[in-house]
Image: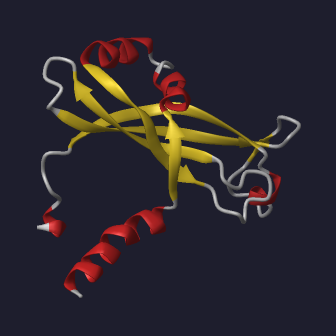
Amino acid sequence: MKSIVISMLLCLPSICLAEGSVSFATIKPIIEQSPTLWKHLDKSFTFAGMGEGARLGRHWPLLGGTRVAPYSLLVASKDNPKIKFTLVVNCVTKYYTDRGEQVSKEAVDFIQKAAKTEEILLNVSLRPIDREPDALK
């Protein structure tokens, strides 16, 4: 019984966050918006082929299922592949109609009108994965 409860608690955060798989090929161009940052990260780490991003739900008529930042991806040090981190990529996400007009997030019909996204790199962070969060100890 205890293992079932623990399993449910570990799965619950991913359900609440509504994350979905996203390829590194999707994340890479966002990081490349800062060539200096990309050069340093590419020199220092190898990147997993798949990561996760926030998933827009079905209530978005035109964007349901779309992945948006924050993205997370496993990376390993090129110097020592046993040293791994979670790379988190944060962006400013802008939304546009299908005609290319920017939609204000404050608009009443924002979710109904948004048909395209543009993501502008805000920052990245590295989180060590060799430590358990205090809540799981």
Left or right: 107 as drawn, with respect to 92:
right
Residue at the extreme bottom of the image, as rendered:
1
Q: Residue at x 83, y 34 (%)?
A: 100
Determine whether 54 is above or below 95 in the image.
below
Residue 41: percent from left, percent from top:
32, 19
Q: Residue at x 50, y 31 (%)?
A: 27
Residue 79: percent from left, percent from top:
15, 17
Left or right: 41 as drawn, with respect to 18:
left
- Tell me the quadrant of the picture where the C terminus can be found: bottom left
Q: Quarter of the image holding residue 136? A: bottom left
Q: Residue at x 79, y 45 (%)?
A: 115
Q: Quarter of the image holding residue 81? A: top left
Left or right: 93 as drawn, with respect to 16:
right
Q: Residue at x 20, y 35 (%)?
A: 84
Residue 45: percent from left, percent from top:
27, 22
Determine whether 2 is above or below 134 in the image.
below
- Tell me the quadrant of the picture where the N terminus can be found: bottom left
